Amino acid sequence: MNDSTRQVNPMLPFTRPWIDEDTIEAVVEVLRSGWLASGPKVAQFEQELSSYFGGRPVRTQTSATAGLELALLACGIGKGDEVITPALSFVATANVIVRVGARPVFVDVGLDSRNIDLEQVAAAITPRTRAILPVHFAGLPVDMERLYTLADRQRLRVIEDAAHAIGSAWRGRRIGSFGDLVVFSFHPNKNITTIEGGAISGGSPEELKAIELHRWHGQVKSGPDGFDTLLPGGKYNLSDVAAAVGLGQLRRLEEFNARRRVLVARYFELWGADPPLRLPERGDAGHSWHVFTPLLPLARMRISRRAFIESMKERGIGVGIHYPAIHLFSAYRALGYREGQFPNAERIGRETVTLPLFPAMELHEVERVVRAVNDIVRGA
Ligand SMILES: *Cc1c(COP(=O)(O)O)cnc(C)c1O
């Protein structure tokens, strides 16, 4: 970012995408090419993602929400089925389960990992359970050995919500390069973007077929007119314009994530052994740090989270919230969920704040955030 942008926009946001000039030129080329919807760029993007995930099949969609929904449909999950998922995530993780007609069965998360509690998953399995839908929260991988041992033993399919986790690795193995169906997001807030977009890595040949049918009108090339409709599919295909953005972003992914790790290391270093807020689990080099989400010590503070966020804003620093507990939203209370069922998710939902973290951020800006947080929390 150059100085003129900085003057126009002195506010430090909690995140900001980084689109380079080569990518902008590639988009202009697509716009001039005459082929805008799914075409050669989508094919190339899927191929490059597939190489990135060790040669597994990859199918792109218009969003991770669409990808999760297609993955559930491809697994044949619907009415009467249960899917186990964390009570703390972006609400889309649970919405898709309801949208295909199944019931989301929530379990709690670790207070510092924010990841699904696998002991509680085991306890929540019933004869109706068909799948587990965990989230690699902030890019910290779930314990994949325990997850898949449990799922395989119970013959459950796993749909990983990896919206935060592109570039993450578990014990050196990239998330998306193994496992059942692994769904990524390319929303502008995520580690790489296609503006809107998503992708599924993995799936059996039958599941891939179903994903393709549901993604595009249920159509296949066969029959007397050269095409037939096998099922009433939806329309979730990515455009070539979006794929051109994704190709430019994918080339920068490792660099972006390395930068995120450096910035987070600086937050941890500056706060040292006695941070004024509760820092999230640090993980190892396989953490892709989609968001940096400490908990405010609200019990010791005289101001609310809303007032904290307002004070940060007055100092020119943007703060987000990732996320309120899902089961306390009206739509999920209507399914019978109540306060007190998932104490960690509820506490995180109340206390969490998302501090600035994005590849173009500078180390002195981390220092500025830390000074502001120290002032406000220690003064409150
Ligand atoms: C962003 C996000 C999604 C949805 O991604 P979209 O591409 O915006 O549909 C799903 N799950 C989690 C955990 C997310 O953060």
Image (spheres, rainbow, N blue to C red):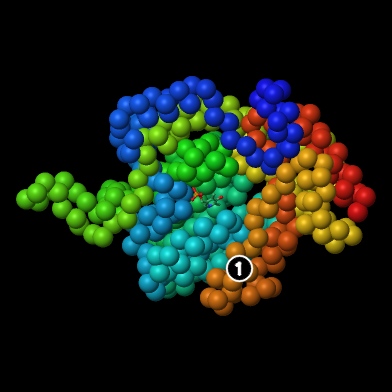
Type of residue at label 1?
Phe
> Is the C-beta of the residue carrying label 1 under 8 Å from the nearest atom of ligand 1?
no
Where residue 353 appears, as percent x and y from the top left, is 73, 51
Residue 294 makes an appearance in the image: yes
For this view, does 262 lie left or right of residue 199? right
- As drawn, the residue found furthest toward the left would be 224
Task: Name the foreground residue: 126 vs 280.
Answer: 280
For this view, does 217 lie left or right of residue 167? left
Residue 269 makes an appearance in the image: no
The picture quadrant where one finds residue 349 is bottom right
Q: Quadrant of the N terminus?
A: top right
Task: Name the foreground residue: 232 vs 58.
Answer: 232
Position of residue 330 relative to residue 298, above or below, is: below
Q: Residue at x 61, y 42 (%)?
A: 290
Q: Residue at x 70, y 33 (%)?
A: 9
For this view, does 219 lie left or right of residue 29? left
- As drawn, the residue found furthest toward the front would be 8
**Label 1 crowd bin: few (<14), some (14–19), many (20+), radius 10 Å:** few
Q: Quadrant of the C terminus?
A: bottom right
Where residue 258 appears, as percent x and y from the top left, is 62, 29
- As drawn, the residue found furthest toward the right would be 379
What residue is disc 1 on? 329
Where residue 184 appears, as percent x and y from the top left, is 48, 45
Q: Residue at x 52, y 69 (%)?
A: 105
Position of residue 349 relative to residue 183, above or below, is: below
| Callout 1 secondary element | loop
Where residue 57 appears, as percent x and y from the top left, is 35, 40
For this view, does 375 lie left or right of residue 106? right
